[in-house]
Image: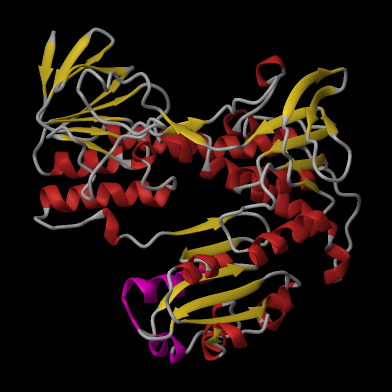
Amino acid sequence: MKRTFDAIIVGAGQAGPPLAGRLTAAGMQVALVERKLVGGTCVNTGCMPTKTLVASAYAAHLARRGAEFGVTTGEIGIDMKAVAARAQKVVTDARTSNERWLEGMHGLTLLRGHACFTAPDVLAVDGLELTAPRIFLNVGGRALVPDMPGVGDVPHLDNTEMVALDTVPEHLVVVGGSYVGLEFAQMYRRFGAAVTVVERGERLIAHEDADVSDAVRAILEEEGIVVRTGANCIGFSPDPQGVEVSVDCSSGEPTVTGSHVLLAVGRRPNTDDLGLEVAAIATDARGYIKVDDKLQTNVPGIWALGDCNGHGAFTHTAYNDFEIVAANLLDGDDRKVSQRLVGYALYTDPPLGRVGLSESEARKSGRSLLVSKRPMTRVGRAVEKGETKGFMKIVADAETQRILGAAILGTSGDEAIHGILDMMNADQPIETLRWAVPIHPTVSELIPTVLLGLRPLPEVQA
């Protein structure tokens, strides 16, 4: 049996459902196919559960610091089953809300099952054939299992399994020193686990500036997390206490033994079982679907959105993919991925908010640069909250007087960065933000002061 629609969407992550809403509102008959959980990674195993866990870990950390604020508490304990149940409720509520919205959407047929191309314009879903002149792939990604010695011989966890844990590991070894790994490392240290982070590179979050990387490492180590960088020979073997991880760094013990191991070394797209070759849809060497500046694949009438296209691994970039496609198809617009200014955050405590070029990236561009950096100890709001770790840094183009990028590592850095992001999106000169009158007391109020401190690179003082 073959059913014909105006559009087919494969995947109910962050781009698929809102696109279904726009297309059906335009009068189209749409099929949305989801083989697993509505909401994708963000709702089910990513942003929502992890940030809920981060909030619980922050509450435990703040409770332990109660005496600093004149608050007397008893012994602080962690009920991990209650912590996990809270996170699961947040996930279930969000997913259920999305499901109800989609199930009640006029013009939408929501199908549960695995979609696979049987022709360039035909998808099979559990024996049912669907065809449409417009097909949108929003299939997301999953954790990468690295090809490391012994990895198949030992039990290990990924982000999906970590958010489902309802016990605290005795010793969690995190393999991978970037965003996912560091967030789990800090939260489980605050829940009471011993934690070791093992990173092959010479420093954590290596794509950030060295001062950011060093500051984040210092914050984690101050909380008792052991960081092993330069781990040039990572391997795994069974151990009576769990898993032995070989590190072979230039200093320290050559191995570390953990009760649990988290692999946080990257993601891969869910494109290997879609039958893309049948439709002659081009992918790159890592399996990401190749798209043009408007998110169209090499096959007319087929688009790829979200994590599977390699143009952003964030919820907000996936949603922006939907916005770009909808604007071009339905609003007569001419939106492009290359117009997108990407901001992002690392949700350690304090968080890191980032937008645009890092200082090291800006240096490579050959521009004449202005840079300014101020410690969070200069922020009244941070002092009042007793959270003064970190700094703000802004990089600007001396000739155009435009901000090129910024990093705010500090309390509310993930929120304060938006003032800078908005100015960059609006293509406004430094003076525009310099003369803003921010509210006191906020973290954002230091931004004009940081701008006043912009100096050519040789004059910059940390």
Residue 371 % position (x, y): 54, 81
Q: Please tell me which residue is depicted at 66% across the width and 46% down the height of the picture.
A: 201
Query: Could you say which quadrant of the image residue 349 lies in?
Result: bottom right
In the image: residue 34, left or right of residue 41: left
Q: Please tell me which residue is depicted at 53% across the width and 91% down the height of the picture.
A: 452
Residue 20: tell me if it is visible: yes
Q: Is residue 119 above or below residue 460?
A: above
Q: Nearer the viewer, residue 188 or 344?
A: 344
Q: Is residue 372 above or below residue 242?
A: below
Q: Please tell me which residue is depicted at 8% across the width and 55% down the height of the picture.
A: 332
Q: Please tell me which residue is depicted at 17% across the width and 53% down the height of the picture.
A: 327
In the image: residue 199, left or right of residue 458: right
Residue 79 % position (x, y): 78, 38
In the image: residue 441, left or right of residue 310: right
Magenta run includes residue 422? yes
Q: Is residue 445 above or below residue 338?
A: below
Q: How many marks?
A: 0
Which segment did they paint magenta?
A: 417-435
Query: Could you say which quadrant of the image residue 288 lies in?
Result: top left
Q: Is residue 83 above or below residue 432?
A: above
Say how the picture is coloured.
secondary structure
Residue 119 % position (x, y): 16, 17
Q: Nearer the viewer, residue 67 or 238?
A: 238
Q: Nearer the viewer, residue 399 or 328?
A: 399
Residue 402 % position (x, y): 38, 80
Q: Most prominent secondary structure in the magenta stretch?
A: helix
Query: Could you say which quadrant of the image residue 129 lies in?
Result: top left
- In which quadrant will I find the C terminus? bottom right
Magenta run includes residue 47? no
Residue 166: tell me if it is visible: no
- In which quadrant will I find the N terminus? top left
